Image (tube, rainbow, N blue to C red):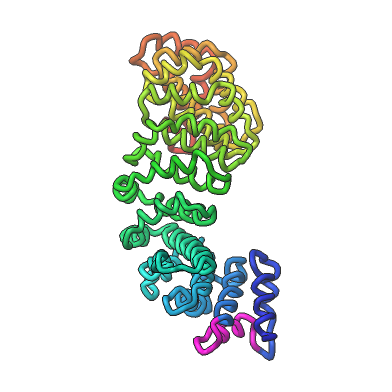
Amino acid sequence: QVRMQALKCFSVLAFENPQVSMTLVNVSVDGESLPQIFVKMLQRDKPIEMQLTSAKCLTSMCRAGAIRTDDSCIVLKTLPCLVRMCSKERLLEERVEGAETLAYLIETDVELQRIASITDHLIVMLADYFKYPSSVSAITDIKRLDHDLKHAHELRQAAFKLYASLGANDEDIRKKIIETENMMDRIVNGLSESSIKVRLAAVRCLHSLSRSVQQLRTSFQDHAVWKPLMKVLQNAPNEILVVASSTLCNLLLEFSPSKEPILESGAIELLCSLTQSENLALRVNGIWALMNMAFQAEQKIKSDILRGLSTEQLFQLLSDSDVNVLMKTLGLLRNLLSTRPHIDHIMSTHGKQIMQAVTLILEGEHNIEVKEQTLCILANIADGTTAKELIMTNDDILQKIKYYMSHSNAKLQLAAMFCISNLIWNEEEGSQERQDKLRDMGIVDILHKLSQSSDPNLCDK
C-alpha cells in the first residue's frame, strides 16, 4: 500500500517536470536506481495498478527528457506494458488509462509510434474501444446507463488520442488506422459527440490523419470529411477550433479534392474572422488556411480573399507582434501576387496599400526570413506588366532594393536581384527606360561587383 502511494506521488511529481525527473533518475535505493525499481514493478505478476502507475512514472520521466526514448526500459518494458493495458481482458478504467498514457509516451517520437503500431495488433485492438456498451437497449437501470455512457465516452476519447499519436508521422500507420473497420465513420461521428473531450480527441485524430496526401485524396474525399469539420468550425470552444482550423489548413492544400467544396461553403468569411481572433493559434491558422487557399487560385478567389480580409485587417496582420502571423501573411500576399494578370489586377486595386505595407516591413526591425519574403513579394510585383510601374515610380522602394543588393546576407541580395532582373527584362515594353533609370542609380556598378562574388548563386544571377 505504501509503495503504491509513493508511486502515485512520483508519477504526479515527474509529469511535465524535467527538474524533478532528472533528480528521480539519479536516486538510488539499496544500490538500485529508481527507474530499475519501476521496471521491476512493471512485471506481469505485480498488481495491475502497480504496473500502470510504474509505467506512468517512466513515461513522465521519458517525456521530460530524463530517460531516452530508445532506452530499453521504455522500448522493451514500458511500451509493451501499456499496450497490454489496452487489451479486452483489462477493466475499462485500466484500458482508458493505458491508452492515454501510451498516447502521451509516443506522441512526439516516430520510432516509438512505429514500435507501438506493430505490438500486439494494437491498431485493431483499439477498434474495440468503440464497441462499448455492447447493447444500450438491454440496460434498464438508469444509474448503470449513466455509468456505461461515461465509460463509453472515456474509451472513445482514449482511442482517438492514441490513434492521433500513432498516426502523427508515418504514412503506413495512417493507412492501417483508416483501414480499420468503419474508422472514418467513427471519426466523423466523433466530431458531433455531445462530450467536448471526445469531440476534441476526434478532431485531433482527424488532424493527425490529414497530414497524409494519399488519404486527403481518397478517404477524406469519400467520406466528405470537410462537411462535419466546417460545422465544428462554426461553433466550438477555442481548444477545438485551434485543432479543427489546423486540419482545415491541410484540407485546403492544392492537391486536396476538398478544397473546391470548402470554398463554396463560405470558408473565406469564416477564415477571415479567425484572423481577427485574440487567440494567437487561431490567427495563425486563419491566415495559413487563406495562404493555402490562394495558392494557384483563380482571380475571383483571390479578390474574394482580399475583400473578405479588408486592407485594414491586412495591415493589422502585417504589424502583428508574432513573427509566425507575419510570415504567413506575407506568404498569403505572395500567393495572391502570382501570375501576371492577377498581379496587375490586384495592384490596380490595392497597389498603394500593398506598397505601403512592403515599405513598412523593409524599414522595420525584422529578421532575415521576413525581409526575404517581402523582397520576393516585390519581385512578384516587378513581374507584372503594369504593376512594375508602382516600383519604378517609387524612389524610396528602389533605394531599398539597391540597399539590399549590397547587404551582408546572400539570401537578401539574391531576392533583391530578382526584383531588378524582373524590372529590366529586355523583351518587355519600356525596358530601356527602366534600365537607364536603374543605371543612373548605380545599380549596374553593384551588379558588376556581384558578378565577382564567391557565392555561385549571386554570381550566376
Q: Is residue 394 left or right of residue 299?
A: right
Residue 243 spot, x, y in % from top left: 51, 48
Residue 15 spot, x, y in % from top left: 64, 67
State whether residue 322 is above or below residue 316: below
Question: Observer-nearest residue: 443 or 63?
Answer: 63
State whether residue 93 is above or below residue 343: below
Q: Is residue 402 left or right of residue 224?
A: right
Question: Observer-nearest residue: 400 or 385?
Answer: 385
For image coordinates 45% across by 15% down, the residue present is 387
Q: Is residue 411 visible?
A: no
Specify the quadrant that holds the N terminus.
Answer: bottom right
Specify the quadrant that holds the C terminus.
Answer: top left
For image coordinates 50% across by 78% down, the residue present is 72
The magenta stretch is: 32-48
Name which quarter of the figure residue 322 lies in: top right
Assess whether residue 309 is covered by the magenta stretch.
no
User: For the view shown, which residue lies furthest in the front direction?
Assistant: 140
State whether residue 110 is above or below residue 434: below
Q: Is residue 394 left or right of residue 179?
A: right
